[in-house]
Amino acid sequence: GMKKKLDKLIKNPPQKLGDRKVEEVESIDGLKLIFSDDDWFLLRLSGTIPAIRCYAEAGTKMKVDKIIAAGLKLLDQ
């Protein structure tokens, strides 16, 4: 299920997300991919429902949308 997918990504995190190079990976609370300009993407299991939540932060909304779109593709693999 979802947890298995997330665990697999944590064990083998991507080096790129879309056209962004992943500079740093944290796996304290799910999988957090950090990019060069402090933009980031986080996948974590929901505490309340059987789902994966995703979060992103970036300088512009367009960047956030791109990060999330690329990040969601990770779950389809």
Image (spheres, rainbow, N blue to C red):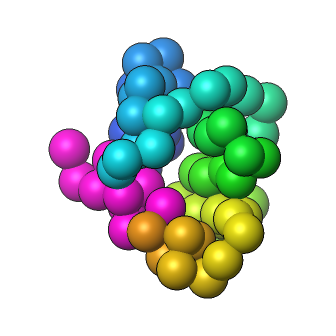
Q: Residue at x 52, y 80 (%)?
A: 62
Vertical order, 7 against 67 (above or below): above
Q: Main SS of the magenta segment?
A: helix
Residue beneath the point at 58% across and 71% down: 64
Q: Residue at x 54, y 70 (%)?
A: 63
In the rendered image, residue 3 lying in the magenta stretch gets the answer no
Q: Is residue 11 visible?
A: yes
Name of the residue lying farthest toward the top: 11
User: Is 18 drawn above or below residue 15 in the view shown?
Assistant: below
The residue closer to the viewer here, 66 or 68, is 66
The image quarter in which residue 61 lies = bottom right
Q: For residue 16, what is the image quadrant?
A: top left
Would residue 44 be seen by someone viewing this image from the given angle? Answer: no
- Give percent across and percent down for residue 21: 48, 34
Numbered circles on residues, count? 0
The magenta segment is: 67-77
The relative height of residue 47 versus residue 74 in the rendered view (above or below) is below
Task: Give the percent coordinates (x, y) of residue 26.
Answer: 72, 28
Tell which residue pokes out farthest to the left in this image: 77
Considering depth in this image, is 8 or 63 the residue closer to the camera? 63
As drawn, 77 above or below 25? below
* Image-based side of 69 in relation to 38, left or right: left
Q: Is residue 73 magenta?
A: yes
Q: Position of residue 8 (x, y in %)?
A: 40, 26
Q: Quadrant of the C terminus?
A: top left
Which of the two residues, 73 or 11, is positioned nearer the viewer here?
Answer: 73
Residue at image position (42%, 18%) is 12
